[in-house]
Image: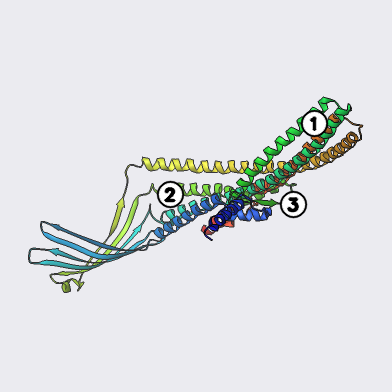
Amino acid sequence: MRKRMPALGMAVLCGAVVAAAVPPAPVPLSLEEAIEQALSHNRDLAKGALDVRGYRLARQEARESVRGFRVVPEGAAGMGPDGEDWRSGLRAEATGPAGTRVALAAAIRSVEVDEADEMRRGEVRVEISQPLFREFGSLVRNEPAVAADETLRAARRAWERDRSALVLRVVELYEGLIYRRRQIERDEELAGRLERLWALADARERQGRATRTEVMRLDFQRGEAEARLETGRARLEIEFQEFANLLGLPLDSAFRLDPPPLLDLDLADPARALAVALAERPDYAQALQEIETGDRQLRLARRRLLPDLRLSARQTTYGEGEEWSDAGRLDQDDWFVGLVADVDLNRRGSRLAVARSETDAEGRRQVAEIVRHRLALEVNSARTGCRRARAELDLARRNRQLAAGRAELARALFEAGRGSADSVSDAESDLSGAELTELAARREASVSAYRLLHVLGTLVPAPRDLLAAGLNERTADEN
């Protein structure tokens, strides 16, 4: 039994090596399944989702800070020439939408008067502070939360465009793999036909019925077909790996792809297509959002020209004495009502900030107009490309049929001894080129339709709150 163990282990090892060397069986994969897989498992898209999540957490933090309710401990302890002094307490404060700040604090304090005596104090303090000019209102109060929300929306819009671009890339690779596979099949068929024609021409040369140049030309074409086959197979392997990586799958994954049906899109009305793009593109909504941001920043800059004046009121109830019981009686009152001002006499910096904000707001309007015209060019280009691809596909089908008829006739004449090898080799080359042209035209017709949907913003529809309509609804609610 001991002598058989090494042989058994070697057999298992050889079996594992053979199994590892056998390529995995191709898995059927439709275009819809490939798109769903990519949207769910693409690594770059997953990283973008994590970034969006980080911005969402930052927005929550900003909202918590704006909400303004805090409970914080207060305390201090120290020693000086007059003795020890320590203080401990708790403070709660809240800030309203208009900037009104209300604070309630309770504290106890112990001060060493001399080596034998200590003064103890307990107090409850209520403070109210109301900004009157610069810091008044929700515009200033809510700015951190509004800015964080806009940053989050910008990140979400960019992520939605990344999703749409990813789907378009999946379609391009899917159609490209089908084209590459069929190109290899056509090259294999051409190589087989050229092999048979070369053998027939070689035999006829020995019989004196064909020239040496005809045989050499067929031999040359046969070698070219073999070279294209090797190149096509190598490219197919790399493209399959790129496709698997795009889908978030292992690089050695194998797929069996079927040509998807061609999309039938309405290309008649360019104005309607542009309207759809303006309504469905998140990047255009982002350009409109930038205008609102610039206008708000301008209002904030103008608000900073106003003085920082606050109405402040404070009521303190306290008790103090040598014993803690004296401090706890809270039998004394102290109050304060007045105005607190912080005025910067050098206004040049604030005025320059206003001028800069005005320029920035106008620049954002110009950018939105640039984006609008760019979208119009993209829509028109995509529509024209889709229409051209359809026309080229129809022509490619017709030319392939003509080339197939000519090649069939040339082969029949050559096999019957009534045609030359040059004519049949030319016909075979033309047929191969026409077939590849038709395959490329079908690939472009399919991809151009999805590219048009990507340009319109309807390939992967974005949530409504990220579009121009959602932006208008929020503006109406705020007004």
- The amino acid on which the numbered mark 3 sits, given as a three-letter code, is Pro
Q: Quadrant of residue 394?
A: top right
Q: Secondary structure at mark 2?
A: helix
Looking at the rendered image, the disc whose residue lies closer to the viewer, 2 or 1, is 1
Q: Secondary structure at mark 1?
A: helix
Q: Which residue is mark 1?
A: 218
Q: Which quarter of the rendered picture does the N terminus lie within?
A: bottom right
Q: Which residue is mark 3?
A: 261
How many angstroms separate mark 1 from mark 3 (CA)?
38 Å
> On the picture, is 121 further left or further right than 169?
left
Residue 434 position within the rendered picture, expressed as x and y whole percent measured from the top left: 79, 38
Reading the chain from its start, which is encountered first: label 2 or label 1?
A: 1
- The amino acid on which the numbered mark 2 sits, given as a three-letter code, is Leu
Q: Which colour style is shown?
A: rainbow
> On the picture, is 210 further left or further right than 452?
right
Residue 373 position within the rendered picture, expressed as x and y whole percent measured from the top left: 62, 41
